Amino acid sequence: MPKGEPFKIKMVEPIRLIPREEREAALKAAHYNPFFLRSSDVYIDLLTDSGTGAMSQFQWSAMMLGDESYAGASSYYKLKETVTDITGYEYVIPTHQGRGAEKSAFSQLIRPGMYVLSNMFFDTTRGHVQLAGGRPVDLLMDYPTDEFHPFKGNMDTAKLERFIAEHGAENIACIVMTVTNNSAGGQPVSMANIRETYQIAKKHGLLVLFDVARYAENCHFIRMREEGYADKAPIDIAREMFSYGDGLMMSAKKDALVNIGGLLAFRDEDLFTRVGAAVVPFEGFLTYGGLAGRDLEAMAVGLREALDPDYLAYRVGQVQYLGELLRSAGVPIQWPVGGHAVFIDAAKFLPHIPWDQFPGHALTLALYIEGGVRAVEVGSLMLGRDPETGENVRSPFEFTRLAIPRRVYTNQHMEDVAEAVINAYKRREEIRGVRFTKEPKVLRHFTAHFDLV
Ligand code: F0G
């Protein structure tokens, strides 16, 4: 197998590392919240892999064919046919991004007080369950972060059965399967687990919706790690996976390789009609959902490119490469490494910082100072407060996430990132926790202000 990226670079965007004193000033001006940094002050931006990927020449050229009709655009039909081919779902609605799909679906499917169960919610997904009056419940399998398991994103199906028995299926709006499981470290979910969850759901008449921001990466892991899938094409694995669900919500900004966009798709007309009723006022008419025709074209092409086995091997391989650099230097990371990001175990990296001074966030600040690298906390800061008690909720993990944009950085960049992390590790005793100087109520991590403790 060749080692190089399965593409060459046709257009470049300059980046530079600003001097350390300027990084210190920029961080202070950003109220110690990397979301407030200007991207021009960032050298390597690993804040997210969402909407930050590079499109291919095929996607750029498809954009010239965008049909900007308000209703029934040919670009919509190209997208719909692609989605139906991959998923088997006949009813397809574009949305402006993943959270548009979440808001439209949950506002229609949840009655106040109902539970929504998941292997683990992503933060906006959890936020939309709560905004619709629902109660999100994570039923992730318990795995130590440093112990190998091929599918650490799995739903704990025993807990799922118990929860349904205790609370009654009539009080549960739906089950959300997040693949890969972002909040648990970008970890994959096995086909066996997806199938079993669906069987349990159907036994109780419950709906299963996929949150498939990174499903192509999940298909790659199933192919590599689950018995019986080594010889299957990623698209065939995807087709089987989608057969164990009733519909999907997707942030197309990840595995559809576009800078903006989202999707809803359903197996039956009833769901489409119910959820579609919310899409029209929130997002736009059912055939454009807040996107331009050219966006729909780019998405249709990107969905197929992301299922290319060579692309997937390169993509997941680059994330593994960074993980190996860190692990071999003794940095505590979630292991095995997930599909889109390396998750540093900040609780272990910074044992002197208490969980409610957010070690995962403290480490993002240190990485920016060390190497101009922007990362994000995934832990108790992101999880927020219990809406009923107002107390901080303690996350099972305190992670600092290094999310790798698709087709954007080279492995040399990964080496610079590793150097910044290793340098921060060497002086870890000096890293301080944070406290809020301003704390918004919902999705607080995006806009909070902090001070060092
Ligand atoms: N679901 C998952 C699993 C996600 O990771 C995200 C976004 C969404 C839904 C929402 O999609 O951003 O298009 O509205 N994740 C990004 C991240 C923001 O950085 O992990 P969106």
Image (tube, rainbow, N blue to C red):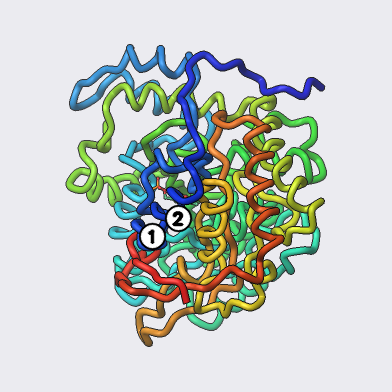
Q: Is residue 13 above or below residue 385?
A: above
Q: Quadrant of residue 439?
A: bottom left
Q: CA distance from mark 2 to mark 1?
A: 6 Å
Find residue 400 and report its horizontal and vertical position in percent.
58, 59
**Discs 2, 1 touching: Cβ within 8 Å:** yes
Q: Which residue is mark 1?
A: 28
Q: Is residue 61 left or right of residue 309?
A: left
**Given the image, on which type of amino acid does mark 1 rest?**
Lys
Q: Is residue 416 above or below residue 395?
A: above
Find residue 272 and report its horizontal and vertical position in percent.
33, 45
In this view of the protein, which residue sits in the foreground, 57 or 141?
57
- What residue is at 56 percent from the left and 24 percent from the top? 305
Q: Is residue 189 left or right of residue 224?
A: left
- What residue is at 57 percent from the left and 54 percent from the top? 367
Residue 226 visible, this orientation: yes
Q: Quadrant of residue 317?
A: top right
**Given the image, on which type of amino acid does mark 2 rest?**
Glu
Which numbered disc covers residue 24? 2
Q: Residues within 10 Å of mark 2 (few under 14, many from 20)?
A: some
Residue 111 visible, this orientation: no
Find residue 378 and report its horizontal and vertical position in percent.
53, 62
